[in-house]
Amino acid sequence: MDRNAKNGATGKNGRGVEVAGTFVLAAPKIEEFQLVKVRVEGAVARLTLDRPDHNLLNERMLSEIAAGINTFGERNAVKLIVLESACKAFCGGIELGEYTQRRVFQMLEAFHSAFAAMLDTATPVLVVVNGAAYGGGAELAALADLVIATPKARFAQPEIKLGVFPPLAAAVLPYILGPKQALELVLTGEAITGERALELGLVNWLVPEADLKKKVDEVIAKVSAQSGPVLTMAKKAILNSLGLPLREGVRSSLKVFLNELAELEDSQEGLRALVEKRAPNWKNR
């Protein structure tokens, strides 16, 4: 993809560029978002999917998700990104109308940008699911660092029923669920409940719908109370070790610990606070 397109350069209409003969939507600015609501509360950035009724992913929505995660992932003051829904479903997947010959290039670019943002951001991401998370919606949950769900949640990768398979889920689910469960979800396309998702490890917490806000606030408080740079390094150490043999994974984690963590003021402050028996005063640097 052309560098200017990737960096959000715009054409004559201010919303996109022409690349290889096709029109690509430029990365929208936060204030221009139409389908994702943005709210920043202290050290937490909340991105709320709001495309009634099922938050079907189109090019615009995927571009806004990518731009939101990339923007807040680069802000040192933001310690946690929360992805949630204002609709009755978390996300029903890709809008089928987007699967046209003329739109396939733009759709794939937007799809790749959104999920690359999820994979690449150093900031922890919490996803809240209170309803259906199908297709791309289930992949958003799978790529999240933390997931809170209710018994209303349903997770499914139904792409096989449309004659395709979910490329991201095919790669990510074996890490989370193991190959047998990943194969079951991808090859049958059947949905699983929130309870089953909790058993399999796709969900961290399952709470009654009436307690959802309380649990989300609790998790936000626990994560945002920590040092921002230490959170990102802890995430980096864990994800960098995935797929490595045990010894190499340990070496990778120790490399981050010794070469990066030790240089932080917050790391030194944490040790002082422990010795002095007081709460640490994070400088987030």
Image: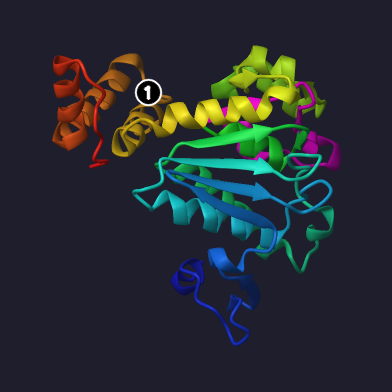
Residue 260 visible: no
Residue at the extreme bottom: 12
Please name whichever residue, 188 or 195, is drawn nearer the observer in this view of the structure: 195
Residue 190 visible: yes
Residue 194's x, y, as percent? Answer: 73, 21
Residue type, label 1: Leu
Residue beneath the point at 14% across and 17% down? 276
Within 10 Å of disc 1 (Cα), the crowding (few <14, some 14-19, many 20+) is few
Residue beneath the point at 22% across and 23% down? 254
Residue on which disc 1 sits: 244
Residue 229's x, y, as percent? Answer: 30, 38
Placement of 110 over or under 119, stated as above or below: below
Q: Secondary structure at mark 1?
A: loop
Q: Is residue 154 magenta?
A: yes
Residue beneath the point at 59% across and 48% down? 47
- The part of the image, by quadrant, that contains residue 101 is bottom right
Identify the magenta region: 146-172
Residue 66's x, y, as percent? Answer: 55, 54
- Quarter holding the C terminus is top left
